Image (cartoon, helix red, strand yellow):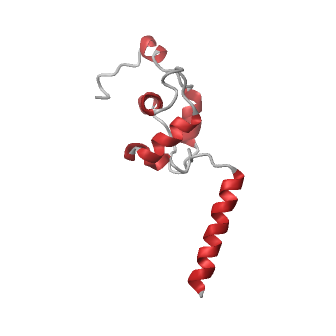
């Protein structure tokens, strides 16, 4: 509940993301004319919690558990396989080597040519 969260100095310390950057991103929307400080705080905290959830899910399902690392491939795999994060697949696509992409592109073109016949 937004009313229960008090913006105290302790609450500000609990935020890691730069509030000024979140404000800038929010103001970049043409639909936003002004930003309430409580809305800014809650948006910043919610963003932080979302990123934490994504990172934790990716770590738990990733390959770096043994070495205590989180890699881009873990994030990409999580966004691809977990429906909750599926909307991020365009932002965190699976990396592919150029030669593999060219091979796939060539196969697609061949299939299109065969379909046209």
Front one among 31 and 72:
72
Percent position of residue 69, x then y: 55, 23
Percent position of residue 21, x then y: 59, 31
Percent position of residue 79, x then y: 47, 43
Placement of the N terminus among the 4 image quadrants = top left
117 over 26 or under it: above or below = below
Percent position of residue 84, x then y: 38, 44
Placement of the C terminus among the 4 image quadrants = bottom right
**Residue drawn where x is 47% and y is 17% of the image:** 12
**Residue drawn where x is 48% and y is 24% of the image:** 65
Residue ranking furthest to the top: 10
**Residue drawn where x is 71% and y is 52% of the image:** 98
- How many callouts does the rendering have? 0
Front one among 78 and 47:
78
Horizontal side of residue 41 vs 18, given as left or right: left
Front one among 61 and 89:
61
Can you tell which quarter of the image residue 73 is in? top right
Residue ranking furthest to the bottom: 117
65 over 110 or under it: above or below = above
**Residue drawn where x is 47% and y is 47% of the image:** 80
Q: Can residue 49 be seen in the rendering of this structure?
A: no
Q: Can residue 67 be seen in the rendering of this structure?
A: yes
């Amino acid at each position: 509940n937004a009313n229960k969260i008090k913006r105290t100095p302790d609450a500000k310390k609990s935020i890691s993301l730069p509030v000024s950057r979140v404000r800038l991103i929010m103001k970049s929307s043409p639909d936003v004319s002004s930003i309430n400080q409580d809305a800014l705080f809650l948006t910043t905290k919610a963003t932080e919690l979302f990123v934490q959830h994504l990172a934790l899910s990716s770590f738990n399902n990733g390959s770096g558990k043994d070495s205590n690392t989180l890699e881009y491939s873990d994030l990409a795999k999580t966004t691809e396989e977990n429906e909750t994060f599926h909307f991020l697949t365009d932002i965190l696509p699976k990396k592919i080597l150029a030669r593999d992409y060219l091979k796939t592109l060539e196969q697609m073109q061949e299939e299109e040519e065969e379909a046209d016949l």
